[in-house]
Image (cartoon, rainbow, N blue to C red):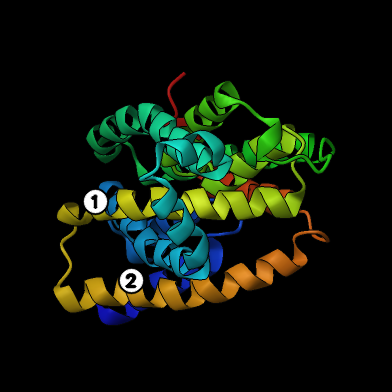
Amino acid sequence: MRVVEVALLGIIQGILEWLPISSSGQLIYFMLKVFNVSVEEAYNLSLFLHVGTALAVIVRYRNTYVKVVKCAFSFNCWRENKLLQFIAIVIASSALTALPLYIILTKSLSAIPGDIVTFIIGVLLVLSGLLMITFRSRSRGKSLDDINVKDMVLIGLITGFSIIPGISRSGISVAMLLYYGFSPVSALELSFIVGGIMTFIGGLLNLGSLSLSVPLIVLAIVIPFILGYMVISVLLRIARKLNFSYFAMFIGILMILSSLPYTSLLPG
């Protein structure tokens, strides 16, 4: 891959990662349509591009992370700190669904035509948007003190499905928190904090599957980091006013329409 191609993908990731429209889905769609790469290569690179935006959120919430890490070494703090419990339980439980799905996807994606992948991503985006619309009205200003371990496990298990391109990680985690009564801003911030760790780990684990040179790998981290950091601040300011679920549905419909000439390939 050339420098300009990696830079362009980094720009897309940096802008779209924290929007609930599945940046992985958009990256895969772009790589399939514009760069004509294989589905498997597009999927692996889309996961790694999350490292830069993950670092952006880690830097943005560095004070929160430092407090959580310090607290992790105290048993009493473990029992009392709901944010630490939330991060640990959600990440651990999301791995239960994400890891098996990742193994299945990496083994099967190469056998699926790109246009069918586009169609599936579009459908999942529409469903993600509908889920956010359904739960947004449940916002009641609740906090982490109002949910228990079972709720955290359920949030993690469902969030793990975002390893599937087209299911927005931020979208599905925000939707679940809205379901439990969190405000849009609180849900978004918690999604950032947990998602930063999840996507950082996932991206690094995928490093070995890339065929990029070291300079291109650095570029694929730096550009999403810079843009991702800027987008976080903007998104938090407008979260109270805008409903991105409709945008997710719109993008999903466009992707479905773009694949219609090829839907005859779908089984059944």
In x, y percent, where is residue 75?
41, 36
Q: Label 1: state its secondary structure.
A: loop
Q: Which residue corresponds to mark 1?
A: 206
- Which quarter of the rendered picture does the N terminus lie within? bottom left
Q: Specify the label residue 255 is tagged with.
A: none
- Answer with mark 2 or mark 1, whichever residue precedes in sequence: 1
Q: Is residue 80 left or right of residue 245?
A: left
Using the image as rendered, state which of residue 182 and residue 4 is in the foreground.
Answer: 182
Q: Is residue 37 above or below residue 93?
A: below
**Is 123 situated above or below 42?**
above
The image shows residue 31 at horizontal and vertical percentages of: 37, 60
Tag 2: amino acid = Ile
Q: Which mark is residue 221?
A: 2
1 vs 228, left or right, is left
Q: Secondary structure at mark 2?
A: helix
Establish if 258 lies above or below 123: below
Specify the amino acid type for callout 1: Asn
Q: Is residue 265 left or right of residue 207?
A: right
Residue 188 in the image: x percent, y percent? 65, 53
Q: In the picture, residue 83 is in which quadrant? A: top right
Q: Quadrant of residue 50?
A: bottom left
Number of labels in the image equals 2
Q: In this rendering, does residue 169 appear at all?
A: yes
**Residue in front for this viewpoint, 259 or 189:** 189
Where residue 181 sits: x, y (%)?
A: 77, 36
Disc 2 crowd, CA 10 A, few/some/many (<14, 14-19, 20+): many
Residue 119 visible to an observer of this rendering: no
How crowded is the residue under tag 1: few (<14 C-alpha within 10 Å), some, or many (20+)?
Answer: some
Task: Name the residue rendered at 35%, 45% in the picture.
Answer: 73
Residue at (36% x, 33% y) in the render: 95
Please say if 50 is above or below 249: below
